[in-house]
Amino acid sequence: MPAAGFRDCPALPDGVDPSRWRCEVHTAAPTLSMGTVSVRLAPITMTHAEGPLPDGGDGQVWGAMRTTPTTLPGGRGPVRHLAIQPEYGGRSDFYTGRFSLRFRLLGPLPAPGCAIGASAPVDFRMTRSGPSTWVSQDPPLIEFSAYDDTFTAPAAEHCGPLTTALNRHLGLPAKEGNLMTYDASYTFETYDRLGYGRLSD
């Protein structure tokens, strides 16, 4: 089971049946190439809920994303000791494999708000690399791999006087040649088994 457990499961929409909604927790070990950046990111854990809405449509509710910074290799002068940390970009659709991220740039010199995708986050459309594998039935644990080699990487913004130097060093913006690979596992539990009673109809 992903280490975060079910602590970030979000509240459900009004009028849905908790026994038909499940909280999903997935942990990924991504590799990221964009511009001149090529790095294996620290593990990312995402939590969301999904299930049928009262009108019969597919519903999803975002929960949380947890990760830690990853040091970028190389860099001298104004770009030394630079680290990158993904942040949730505000959009997700786990039925289709689409989600958005910003990439915070951390270090002794960049301004606090420095990020790739600060104004418009990076949009990913993940494609499965092959079939999913059930590692365990009880508790459920499923592994899968996915990738996106079509996304556009924007320039870093809000980095203060270092903005131009950072973008030159990182090769940003980069319209093509970018790649995210995504080896992941996920588990789930229905909300009635998580202690939620039936919500009001």
Image (cartoon, rainbow, N blue to C red):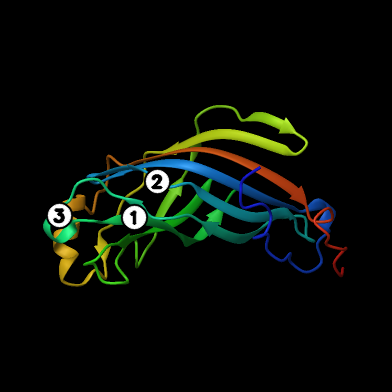
Left or right: residue 111 versus residue 54 is left
- Residue type indicated by callout 3: Arg
First in sequence, mark 1 or 2: give its number.
2
Left or right: residue 85 versus residue 72 is right
Q: Secondary structure at mark 1?
A: strand
First in sequence, mark 3 or 2: give its number.
2
- Residue type indicated by callout 2: Leu
Find out whether the residues at labels 3 and 1 contact each other: C-beta distance under 8 Å.
no
Query: For mark 1, what is the residue?
Result: 84
Q: Quick check: 113 above or below 25? A: below
Residue beneath the point at 63% across and 55% down: 48
If the image is split into quadrants, where does the N terminus sit? top right
Q: Position of residue 170 (x, y in %)?
A: 21, 51
Label disc, if present, on residue 124 of the rendered structure: none
Q: Quick check: 45 above or below 140? A: below
Find out whether the residues at labels 1 and 2 contact each other: C-beta distance under 8 Å.
yes
Spatial separation of the CA atoms under disc 1 and disc 2: 8 Å
